[in-house]
Image (cartoon, rainbow, N blue to C red):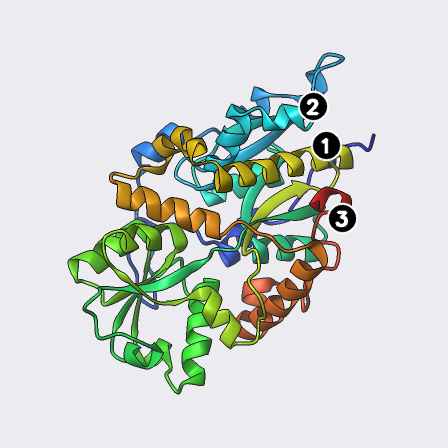
Amino acid sequence: MRKRQTPTIADPVAALATTSRAASDGLSDERPRPAPRQSTRRETFGLISAAGAAALVDPRRLRAGELPTFRIGTLPYGTVQWEVQTIVDRGLDRAAGVRILNVPLASNEAARVAFLSGSVDAISNDLLFAARLKAEGKAIQFLPFSTKEGALMARASSPIRGLADLKGRSIGVAGGPLDKSWLVLRAAATKEGVDLAREARPVYGAPPLLAAKVESGELDCGLLYWSACARLAAKGYREVVSVEELADRLGARGRIAFVGFLFNDGAPEAELAGVARAVRGGERLLADDPAAWTAVRPLMEAKDEATFDALKRAFIEGIPHKGRAEEIRDASDFFAVMVQLGGTALVGDARSLPADLYVAPAVYG
């Protein structure tokens, strides 16, 4: 059995800052200013420090005959916990020869730090972040989780029907100026003769806050992550265009997994294969068994049936189905587009998708 290696990073703050998609509690224009931030009740509930997470389970303390424990860091308000909770509740992990432990963390930054410090064995995160770490020599692997990214949403009565209609409009952008969805939207608009950075009014912030601003009419539209889009769609709001469609327009063929599980490359392959089997089993269960959503619903914060159905439908639509070779080919095409759009500020020094980023064929399934 190989010795589990802990990924290290020379400057975790810098790496997080350049690729962060975490939400701020305020809105900002092209020159965002730092603002004091207070922890929300959700974050307080969900926060487990890196040291605390490490203390929860130490795989080396397992007694003979016990299943290896695999710690997955999740966000209390994230969609990954829907699947992890399903896996644990239905015993899919044990059936695959591993014990998965759900470790709640407060934010994307907390999850990344916990993973890089070795306090958890896996997190879900952005493909570009994973590729950047791999290109820097970090020992990680990537297993696709969701092909859903986000969309540009507007009121049903909005005159915004295409990218040319965004001139002079206020656009809520989840994340920041280097968010890949914003870069893709800008590039696609440029092909239609519209410079959104100069001819529109982007406002950056947290998806829930931006969605509320769209609902109140303070923003003309919002470029939001898929879960926020689903919540708006349940209220009758309209999708102008999806990020996936925009990526296709720019030459990134085929839908890819924008988000995946990041694994420690030093974990035994048999253990990773067990985790991957449990993940795929959870996906099949959520896709095929409506009863599986009964236990998940309390985690979804769906206040009505329309919201519940929209979130459920979008989650299932995002389940990846491509084989490993096809996924890598299409992801490489997308990565090449992002290199052109964002350069080193977005993807670091990598000029192509690292060849060994994805988990081995035996693990991928």
Q: Left or right: where does residue 221 sit relative to residue 93? A: left
Question: Circle 3 is placed at which residue position?
Answer: 361
Q: Which amino acid type is shown beneath numbered disc 1?
A: Glu
Q: Can residue 349 be seen in this snapshot?
A: no
Quadrant, the N terminus: top right
Question: Circle 1 is placed at which residue position?
Answer: 271
N-terminal of the two: label 2 or label 3?
A: 2
Q: Position of residue 102 (x, y in %)?
A: 52, 29
Within 10 Å of disc 1 (Cα), the crowding (few <14, some 14-19, many 20+) is some
Can you say whether 67 is above or below 215 in the image? above
- Report the residue at 37% width, 83% height from top: 194
N-terminal of the two: label 1 or label 3?
A: 1
N-terminal of the two: label 2 or label 1?
A: 2
Can you say whether 333 is above or below 208 in the image? below
Question: Circle 2 is placed at which residue position?
Answer: 68
Q: Position of residue 269 (x, y in %)?
A: 77, 37
Q: Which amino acid type is shown beneath numbered disc 2?
A: Pro
Measured in 3D between alpha carbons, the distance from the residue under mark 1 to the one under mark 3, in whole angstroms, is: 14 Å
Q: Which amino acid type is shown beneath numbered disc 3?
A: Pro
The quadrant in which residue 266 appears is top right
Quadrant, the C terminus: top right
Can you say whether 99 is above or below 4 in the image? above
Q: Left or right: where does residue 186 sit relative to residue 361? A: left
Q: Can residue 91 be seen in this snapshot?
A: yes
Q: Position of residue 254 (x, y in %)?
A: 58, 66
- Report the residue at 54% width, 64% height from top: 346
Q: Left or right: where does residue 358 sit relative to residue 312? A: right
Pointer 1 with pointer 3, Cβ within 8 A: no
Q: Left or right: where does residue 55 sit relative to residue 359? A: left
Secondary structure beneath label 3? helix
